[in-house]
Structures are given as C-alpha cells and as structure tokens.
Image (spheres, rainbow, N blue to C red):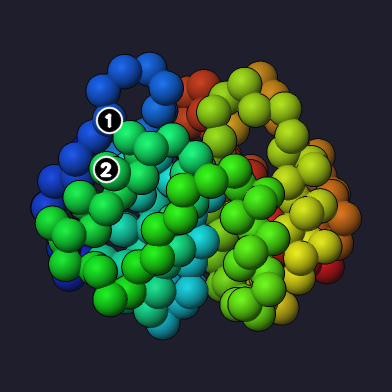
C-alpha cells in the first residue's frame, strides 16, 4: 500500500497484519480520488474507521489542509501514528482512539466542519444509516461537503438518510462506494 499522488507520491504506508482491517485497494482509492480531485485542496478531512490512515493521508498528500483520523483499535492507531511520522504530517493530523460515535460527539463540541468525510467500516458493520444520521445531527459536514462511504456491494446503503442523499454509486468487484451530500 502506498500514496498514489501528490507531495508524498510513492511513499509506502505501514499496514496492519491480520484480517481485522481491510484497507482500501489502490484501484478503489485512485478511482475515489479521481472523482473528488477538485474538492481536496485546502479541505478538512475526517477519516472514520481509519485503519492505516490510507484515505486521510492520500488527502493530505494531494493538498488537504487537515485530517482527523478515528479508529478504536489500538494497533490501527499506532499504525496511523507511525504512518503520520513517516510521511511528515504531524502538524496537519489529529489521531483519536475510540468508538466512532463517542469520538464524533467530542469533535462536534469543537465546531469543526468537514469538507470530506471518509467512512470505511468493517463490511459486517450494520449501523451505516445510524452513523449517517448522527453525522447529520452533529452538524459536522460543511454545507457543500461530501461523505464517501465504502461498503460491501451486498449491503447497499439507502438513497436518502436524514438530510443526506446519495448522488453517486460505484462498484469495484465486491466493494461499493456511495457518495452523499446535503440536500
């Protein structure tokens, strides 16, 4: 796994051994960033279920201003910290260990608005609708921001959740990617 483009192009990312983490493949990542490339520069990014930090670090490499990473697994958090140091993004990154909803509650109190929110939970995650509703309730997505939700194609997400609607869907083998925005 590596950074595909930008300032850190070609730099490797430390990975996590085992089956608890399923990193976004380079093919899927490249496709996502081709779709959102005009939104990256100076953006504030949230990487939920961050794993290795793959999506957040790709954003920083391409010109994002700040990335916040959240994962509850201690090994994932240590891996994100190591990747952050190796890439030199300490000043632009915040890394939190904890449950996603509890972490979002803390972040919402800081009045941060995100331009891009990446959600890449385990494929057996059953709370996609509830998570999107919580993001809406917390009011942490910028008015013109987007949510990119990676999921198993066998578990599609609804077209509309709370104030968000799905404006694009892509399939890459068994991986589905749903793009949401307000409206």
Depth check: give the residue in front, 36 or 61: 61
Occupied quadrant, residue 24: top left
> How many neighbours does mark 2 have within 10 angstroms: few (below 14), some (14-19), or many (20 or more)?
some
Residue 175 in percent (x, y) is at 51, 29
Which of the image's four quarters has the C terminus? Answer: bottom right
The residue indicated by pointer 2 is 79
Depth check: give the residue in front, 33 or 151: 151
Residue 181 in percent (x, y) is at 71, 63
The residue indicated by pointer 1 is 16
Which of the image's four quarters has the N terminus? Answer: top left
In this picture, residue 168 sits left or right of residue 19: right
Per the image, label 1 sits on a secondary structure element best described as loop
Which labelled disc corresponds to residue 38? none
Which residue is drawn at the image coordinates 71% and 78% (left, top)? 143
Which residue is drawn at the image coordinates 79% and 62% (left, top)? 136
In this picture, residue 62 sits left or right of residue 169: left
Depth check: give the residue in front, 64 or 52: 52
Residue 109 in percent (x, y) is at 68, 73
Which residue is drawn at the image coordinates 72% and 38% (left, top)? 128
Residue 87 shows up from this direction: yes
In this picture, residue 75 sits left or right of residue 107: left
Residues at circles 2 and 1 in contact by the CB criterion of under 8 Å: yes
Point out the tag, 2 or 1, that comes first from the N-terminus.
1
């Amino acid at each position: 796994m590596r950074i595909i483009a930008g300032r850190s192009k070609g730099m490797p990312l430390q990975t996590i051994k085992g089956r608890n983490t399923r990193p976004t493949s380079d093919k899927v990542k490249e496709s996502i960033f081709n779709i959102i490339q005009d939104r990256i520069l100076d953006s504030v990014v949230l990487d939920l279920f961050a794993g290795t930090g793959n999506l957040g670090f790709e954003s920083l490499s391409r010109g994002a201003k700040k990335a916040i990473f959240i994962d509850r697994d201690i090994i994932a958090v240590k891996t994100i910290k190591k990747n952050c140091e190796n890439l030199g993004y300490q000043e632009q990154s915040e890394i939190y260990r904890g449950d996603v909803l509890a972490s979002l509650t803390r972040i919402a109190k800081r009045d941060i608005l995100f331009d891009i929110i990446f959600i890449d939970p385990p494929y057996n995650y059953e709370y996609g609708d509830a998570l999107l509703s919580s993001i809406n309730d917390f009011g942490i997505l910028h008015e013109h921001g987007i949510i990119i939700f990676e999921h198993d194609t066998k578990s599609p997400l609804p077209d509309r959740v709370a104030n968000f609607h799905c404006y694009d869907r892509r399939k890459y083998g068994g991986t589905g990617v749903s793009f949401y925005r307000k409206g």
